[in-house]
Every structure is written in C-alpha cells, then in structure tokens.
Image (cartoon, rainbow, N blue to C red):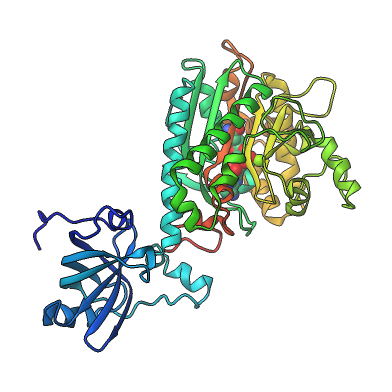
Amino acid sequence: MSQSLAFDSVADILAGRKTGQAVRLRGWVHRARSAGKMAFIVLRDGSGVVQCTIKGGVADDASLEAAKGALIESSVSLLEGTVAADERAPGGFEVKATKFTLHQKAEPFPLRGEQGTEFELDKRHLWLRSTELSAILRVKHRMYKAIHDFYAAEGFHQVDPSVITTNACEGGSTLFTFEYFGQTAYLSQSAQMYLEGCIFGMPKVYSITPSFRAEKSRTTKHLTEFHHLEAEYAWWDAEDSRVHQEKLVTYVAHTLAKDCDGDLRLLKQDPARLLKIGTFVATEGGQDEAGKRFPRVDYAWCVDELKRQGFHVNYGDDFGVPHEKALTEGRVNPMFICDWPAKIKAFYMAEKPGTDRVFCSDLMAPDGFGEIIGGSQRSEDIESMKRRLIAQWHAMGESTDAEDRKQFAHERKAIEDRLAKAAGGKAPSGEAVDAESLRPYEWYFDLRRYGSVPHSGFGLGIERLLRWFTGQEHIRDMLPYPRTPARAYP
Ligand code: 4AD
Ligand code: MG
C-alpha cells in the first residue's frame, strides 16, 4: 500500500473536526462484531477508538468480506468512509465505510482479560495495546517534558552520569553486581555521588537515569529497575531543597492536570485532584509552617503520632507501609518527614550537630502511595562518613538477613585475599580490611578536599510519582516492560 496516502486520525473525528467529511483511517481492530450483511469494527489508531460500520450495498463485497473475517488486533485500513455524528456510537461518532481492507488477519488474540496477572505479564508485549497502559505512558511522556521545562526555567543543567559504577551509594545489599573486564562493578542505585562531583563546575545539575535495586521486597511500589530524577545543587541546605522539591512536584501535577485531562479521565482520575496539590492546607500536620506548600513534620513527631494511633513503634525504627499509610491518610498534599536518626539513613547525609539525627527528608505521598522523594544535605566531614560507612558495612555482616551476611562475607574475603596477596601471604588486620573497604570512595572524599561547599540534593522515583498521579494499583504499570524479582521477560 502506498505510504504517501494521507490518513486521518481518530482523535480528530472524536473532536468533531471531521463530521460529514470523507476520511481514510488505518489501525487495529479493537473490537469486532457482525450480523448478516453488516460488520461493526471498533478501530484503534493510537489516537483513539472509533466505530466503523461496513454495510453490504454501501461497501463493496470484498470490503464486507474482509470486515467480517477480521479478528481483533488484525491490522486494517479504511480507505474510504464518511464520518457521521451518532449518539449511539461510543464517543458519539461513526465512520460509514465504503472501502475497507485487511493488512494482516490476526490469529486469535491470546489475551481475553480474565486470565490473571501472570499470564498478562507473560504477554506484556501484547498487553501494551490496552488503552489504559497507553494512557499511563502518554502521561509519563508529558511528565518528562514538564520536568525538563521546569529545570530549564530554574537554570539547571542536565548531565548524564554513568550507571556502571564501583560505588554503593545506598548500601551494599541491594546492588546488582557484575564483572566488568576483570573487576567487580555494580548497576547504579543512584547518580547522586556523580552529580555531587558535577556541582563544582555547574552548581545546579540534574539527571534522569535508570537506577537499579536488587530489592527482595515484592510490593506494589518496588521495581528492580526504575527511573530516577536526581538533582544536586551547591550552597543549598536541606530546607532550600524542600522548597525546590515542592515547587517541582506542584508544577508537574498542575501541568498534567491541564495537559492530560483526557488520559487522566480515561484512568478514572479527576484532574482537579492534581490541581489541589501545592495548595497549602494549614491543618494538615504536626509542624505546619504558613507559606510552605507541603507540611513538614519531624521524625520524632511521627513516632509519637503513630504511638498515639496504637502502633508498636520505637524511636529509631524505620517506617513500614502501615505506618506510612496511617501518617498520610486523607491528605491532599504529600508531607515531608524530616531529620531522621542517622543510624537508619545513608552515610552521606550531614549530621545534625549535638543530636543523633541527620539533615534529610522523605517526601511521603498521601494514602499510602509511599515515599516519592528521598533528599538530604550532604556531609562535608570525611571522618564522619568513613565511620558511618564502616559501621553500615559491619551492620550488614550482623544482619538478620542471610543474603546480607553472605554479601558482607564475600566482600570481606575478597579484600582480605587482595591484601594478603600484596603482603606476600600475610593476613591483614581487621582495621586494614576496613580501611581498604573505603578505597572506592576516595574520589568522593576528594570533593570535600578541594573547595567543599554545603550542598543538598534528592532523588525522585519517576514511576512512584506517576503511580500516585494516575492513582494506579501497581507500579509495574508505569513501565512498558517492568522488572521485578520474578520477571525479566519479555
Ligand atoms: O530514597 P532513595 O533510596 O534515595 C537515593 O537513592 C538518594 N541517593 C537520592 C539522592 O539523594 N540523589 O531513592 C530515591 C527515590 C525514592 O524516594 C523512591 O521514589 C525511588 O527513588 N525508589 C524506587 N522506586 C521504585 N522502585 C524502587 N525499588 C525504588 N527505590 C527507590
Ligand atoms: Mg529513601
């Protein structure tokens, strides 16, 4: 078939721009039904679906034959037809075809909608045709543009840090390890450390990269490969960062509410919900400050609040899904939980003088959609970072999780062997092994040696934010080919 023929779009028909006019369409059979000398084809072209009628006498015999034989997902062309407004047709319009052809008559389509999640995930490459998944992915596409627009307006530069790394940014037990030309390397958990290195030449930078977590958790908000928006800026403290984060989240929410109205409604979401985000609600939390878009609450306030609600939780504990849910239920805005105990946070966060806390915050979305952003002010104290890195490494060795202990033993053995070899077989001391474990971070400590500045940054999970905005059950539907512990196919 000639590629030079001009084709119309279903979206234009549904918008009423083609009524009474001749059109030419191509796409796939979304639904099909026939009776006697009449066939109804719901045609999908990627911009929408429209009902087409192919009626004997109006269309020629070959067209009617083709339409009656077309199983769903067959690829088809409607080469001649006229658009009519028709209240009975879904979407309010119908195309009366006079010439209709099949490009490929599909085999019986394996997905019928009631075969269960695992089957649908095995057929993900076919399931991607669903109108809901397409709507989610279109919203995501718009989200990326909104993010880039936001950063351009804020004077940030986008950079591309490598995802092949020798550093464990978020700790060792959720790393994917591989052999890189004879040395051990990892798939990056976070671009943060590399972004920190960029701010001395370009003080405001951001990146969007895949991040990898060998998470054993199988929840509706964990992926093993997700997309990470990270930003880092020189001179800014943790609160400057929060002001920036709420501005970003609000801008993206409002942009999507305006530009993705149809797709959000298709996903049964009211765009008005997104427009309310960033509207300060004074009664929302423990420590609201007037003028801020999202409430800030202190970690200790959350522990007290959870106790008050009857949870068994102690100061120093991390929060789980039920806790997050209890703290955020019914809110409009997400909430910053600030200044967590150092011992449950990463080594690179700046210690809050005279306390056991660090300058950081997790941004929690309402109604149990969970953590959207993790951010902090970065430590400039090399000795503190070394101490905490070693402590965290040892904690892995004493973990209740056998995988963690195995990983620790493996790393330690590798270092011991390397040091022993260099010393002609003499076993190294424990201190020497600890010190050697810090070697991959030497370049990172350099950033504190040559013109260190206070600086802050954060990481936002694109699929987490999208899941909240689109109100979806499972994070896997935020990606065409999701990766989870149980799945790397198709
Ligand atoms: O809180 P996280 O682990 O923080 C960091 O990686 C920092 N180094 C980021 C930084 O400061 N530059 O991860 C940041 C965000 C989380 O808040 C969450 O939204 C998302 O990344 N995330 C995941 N999303 C999907 N699946 C997972 N397994 C995720 N783990 C983290
Ligand atoms: Mg986090």
Q: Name the residue at the bottom extreme.
A: 36
* Image-based side of 193 in relation to 111, left or right: right
Hey, which residue is sitting farthest top in the picture? 451
How far from the left and from the top, in percent, is residue 419?
A: 61, 34
Image x and y of residue 320, in percent: 75, 51
- Ligand 1 is found in the corner quadrant, namely top right
Q: Where, quadrant-wise, is the N terminus in this rendering?
A: bottom left
Residue 415 visible in rendering: no
Using the image as rendered, state which of residue 15 and residue 25 is in the foreground.
Answer: 15
The one nearer the camera, 69 or 308, is 69
Could you tell me if residue 247 is visible in this image?
yes
User: Where, by quadrant of the figure, is residue 299 drawn?
Assistant: top right
Figure label count = 0
- Quadrant including the C terminus: bottom left
Residue at 84 percent across and 36 percent down: it is 300
x then y, percent, for residue 14 = 33, 57
Q: Is residue 23 above or below residue 234?
A: below
Q: Residue at x 78, y 34 (%)?
A: 297
Of 113 and 316, the residue lying toward us:
113
Image quadrant in which you'd find residue 86:
bottom left
State the image coordinates of residue 177 (x, y, percent, origin top left). 53, 47
Q: What residue do we see at 44% from left, 63% from top?
A: 489
